[in-house]
């Protein structure tokens, strides 16, 4: 449920906001940013699929050695749909899930199996300290306690304990600037914003790169500076 990556001493590490099936657009911005897959790494805040036209490319992206992602609520919904668990079909369709529901059951299982391998959280060591990545929010006030919870429970983490990581919008709606203790920064997506928002040490970087009028925001994890790409 949590994966840790040691410091990248050869290149740069970036985090990207919600992709939502816009992998071709993402490829273009990486070229524009001078991303070098031989030495650079890209970390996704989740919600890799739905809404865009390229959702089925997600498996090839997850196979790339330099691309790493946490599980978003859209991946979690796909997992539950494939397992025939309770899903609001109308809401799933409205939020871009038609491509997944149209797949054969065998194909659905293939994607769901890949999504089940995605952790709830990622830690990345940087030259200036540890950076955490989670889709929606860190549900505890201390990252060390959050890490300990995930490590102790592993795959047995219950759905009610997973949901705040993937669904919560409390911090951004309340504009809560309380820092998460025990970590340099926490990077999240989930809530589309016109501009990146930094609340305490929590960086909200989903700026709607999957929308026609939105932009992708790319966060350098060493420098914690953000650049937007149309």
Image (tube, rainbow, N blue to C red):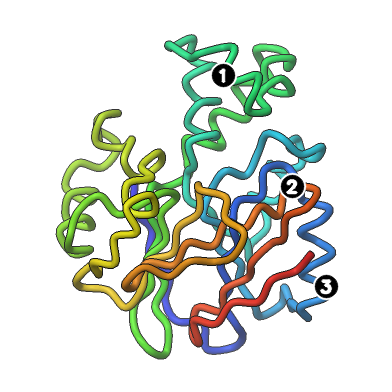
* Image coordinates for residue 23, horizontal then vertical, percent: 77, 51
Q: Is mark 3 on a helix, strand or loop?
A: helix
- Judged by depth in the image, the label closer to the viewer, 1 or 3, is 1
Residue 206: image quadrant is bottom right
Crowd around label 1: few <14 · some 14–19 · many ≥20 (10 Å): few
- Which residue is located at x 44 percent, y 67 percent? 203
Q: In this view, does 72 lie above or below 126?
A: above
Q: How many numbered marks, from 0 up?
A: 3
Q: What element carries label 1?
A: helix
* Image coordinates for residue 40, horizontal then vertical, percent: 64, 77
Residue annotated with mark 3: 31
**116 and 211: which is toward the camera:** 211
* Image coordinates for residue 110, horizontal then vertical, percent: 63, 27
Q: What element carries label 2?
A: loop
Crowd around label 2: few <14 · some 14–19 · many ≥20 (10 Å): some
Question: Does 92 sit left or right of 216 as displayed?
Answer: left
- Judged by depth in the image, the label closer to the viewer, 3 or 2, is 2
Q: Say whether disc 3 or disc 2 marks the residue closer to the N-terminus.
A: 3
Q: Quadrant of the C terminus?
A: bottom right
- Which residue is located at x 24 percent, y 48 percent? 150
- Which residue is located at x 69 percent, y 71 percent? 228
Crowd around label 3: few <14 · some 14–19 · many ≥20 (10 Å): few
Q: Say whether disc 2 or disc 1 marks the residue closer to the N-terminus.
A: 1
Task: Work out how far the residue at label 3 is from the one at label 2, CA to CA, in angstroms.
Answer: 20 Å
Q: Residue 91 carries which label?
A: 1
- Give the residue at the far front of this rendering: 174
Task: Work out how far the residue at label 2 is from the one at label 1, CA to CA, in angstroms.
Answer: 18 Å
Q: In this view, does 82 lie above or below 71?
A: above
Question: Does 41 sit left or right of 118 as displayed?
Answer: right
Residue 53: image quadrant is top right
Q: Residue 211 carries which label?
A: 2
* Image coordinates for residue 39, horizontal then vertical, percent: 66, 80
């Amino acid at each position: 449920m949590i994966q840790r990556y040691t410091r990248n001493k050869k290149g740069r590490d970036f985090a990207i906001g919600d992709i939502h099936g816009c992998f071709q657009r993402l490829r273009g911005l990486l070229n524009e940013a001078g991303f070098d897959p031989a030495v650079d790494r890209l970390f996704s805040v989740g919600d890799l699929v739905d809404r865009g036209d390229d959702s089925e490319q997600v498996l090839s992206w997850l196979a790339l050695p330099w691309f790493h992602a946490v599980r978003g609520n859209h991946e979690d919904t796909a997992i539950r749909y494939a397992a025939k668990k309770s899903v609001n079909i109308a809401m799933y369709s409205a939020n871009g899930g038609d491509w997944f529901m149209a797949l054969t059951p065998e194909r659905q299982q293939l994607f769901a199996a890949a999504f089940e391998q995605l952790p709830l959280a990622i830690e990345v060591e940087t030259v200036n300290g540890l950076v955490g990545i989670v889709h929606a929010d860190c549900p505890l006030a201390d990252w060390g306690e959050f890490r300990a919870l995930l490590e102790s429970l592993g795959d047995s983490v219950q759905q009610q304990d997973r949901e705040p990581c993937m669904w919560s919008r409390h911090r951004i709606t309340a504009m809560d600037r309380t820092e998460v203790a025990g970590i340099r920064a926490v990077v999240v997506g989930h809530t589309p914003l016109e501009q990146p928002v930094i609340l305490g040490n929590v960086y909200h970087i989903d700026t709607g790169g999957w929308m026609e009028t939105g932009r992708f925001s790319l966060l350098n994890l060493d420098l914690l500076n953000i650049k937007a790409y149309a």
